[in-house]
Image (cartoon, rainbow, N blue to C red):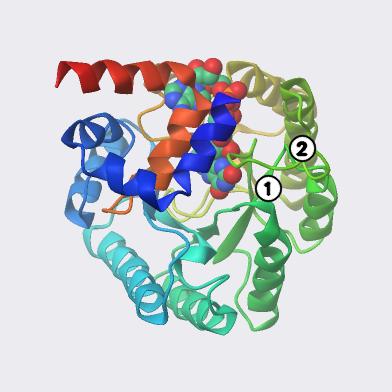
Amino acid sequence: MLRSFLIYLSQAEWAMNLVTNWSVAWKVASRFISGNTIDQALQVVRELNAKGMNVTLDQLGEHTTNVNEANSAADGIIATLEAIDKVKVKANVSIKLTQIGLGMDNEVCKDNLRRILTTAKRLDNFVRIDIEDSPFTDITYDFFKQMLSEGFNVNTVGVATQSYLYRAEKDVRDLLELEAKFRLIKGAYKEPENVAYPKKADVDSNFDNLSAILMDASLKYGTKLERNGILPAIPAIGTHDQLRIDFAKRYAEKIGLGKEGYEFQFLFGIRRDLQIQLVQEGYLVRIYVPFGTHWYPYFMRRLAERPANIWFFVSNFFKS
Ligand code: FDA
């Protein structure tokens, strides 16, 4: 109920105007966001790299409403790839297709995606396409497949899958035939019951099921972390849930998949203790580091995931 309301607010313009005008909102949001500029983000990347963690950089933004905005978002992503190459940090990038035109003008989106992937290929980097709400699932995978048919390969572009979707296993099995690299997550949007499991227990058990499928594929294809922390193996296990992480560790051990054959991914600012612990145990960890001024919807989804974050927000509001 509260989660649904917060997800609704994440898409409401009136709420965005209200929240982003409170200085206290940025104070709380900055726990999850590395800064407004690429330079601030790169400083965070250096610090994480120094702690033994790789990064995926996300220039915040989604659902752009005109061609200029979509093109300039793509320019920003290209500049991010150039900046990573220039300062030689261990980072790839994550993008949202609705930020570069999907849903507004799909041809503009495709052109922008081509431009981004052309740069990534030239710089030997990797682009992960985030997965958004279910009206965009089919088209996101269609664009991915089209990019492969145009000559980009799975070492330049990868995808994500949400364990709350009934369709996830089929998507994963289909795209694994192309050796696609996946980030597995539970899913952060409000989805109807005919599309997604309503019960957390089912989402969790499907997560473990999908972890196993992805790890089997990594073993079969012999994928591993490459390019000095930039190119991931097939499975990126994206969760802060200790039980899901424990399952993945046990399963990898059971099938004999080495630690370089998969990675754990965390959102910046969440379960830092667990991030460090995994690094100390010798596991590969990548942190999703968002930056930029369009932080409102991302921040609201983080509030929706954990009610305690709201009390943190509200108590700061009354303290201000
Ligand atoms: P769960 O929600 O069960 O949380 C487990 C525990 O983690 C909680 O008990 C708490 O301790 C901690 N925790 C979780 N969320 C927290 C928060 N916001 N603040 C503080 N503590 C928190 N989604 C999507 O739909 N498309 C995408 O492309 C991505 N991309 C993505 C990348 C990466 C690297 C991660 C880790 C996550 C995503 N997500 C995403 C978000 C994902 O779908 C999901 O909403 C969150 O990861 C929360 O789910 P958990 O797996 O952490 O489990």
Judge the density around disc 1: few (<14), some (14-19), many (≥20) Cα neighbours within 10 Å.
many
228 relative to 158 in the view: left or right: left
- Helix or strand or loop: what does disc 1 sit on? strand
Q: Residue at x 66, y 23 (%)?
A: 244
Up-down relation of residue 183 to residue 48 (above or below)? below
Q: Residue at x 29, y 42 (%)?
A: 18
Q: Residue at x 41, y 74 (%)?
A: 70
Judge the density around disc 2: few (<14), some (14-19), many (≥20) Cα neighbours within 10 Å.
many
Q: Quadrant of residue 146?
A: bottom right
209 relative to 44 in the view: left or right: right
Q: Which residue bears the numbered disc 2?
A: 210
Q: CA distance from mark 1 to mark 2?
A: 9 Å
Q: Is residue 264 visible?
A: no
Q: Which part of the image, by quadrant, shows the N terminus?
A: top right
Q: Which part of the image, by quadrant, shows the C terminus?
A: top left
Q: Which residue bears the numbered disc 1?
A: 161
Considering depth in this image, is 157 or 215 the residue closer to the camera?
157
The response on whether ligand 1 sits within 8 Å of label 2 is no
Q: Position of residue 154 (x, y in %)?
A: 63, 65
Up-down relation of residue 6 to residue 205 (above or below)? below
Q: Position of residue 254 (x, y in %)?
A: 78, 23
Q: Position of residue 55 (x, y in %)?
A: 39, 45
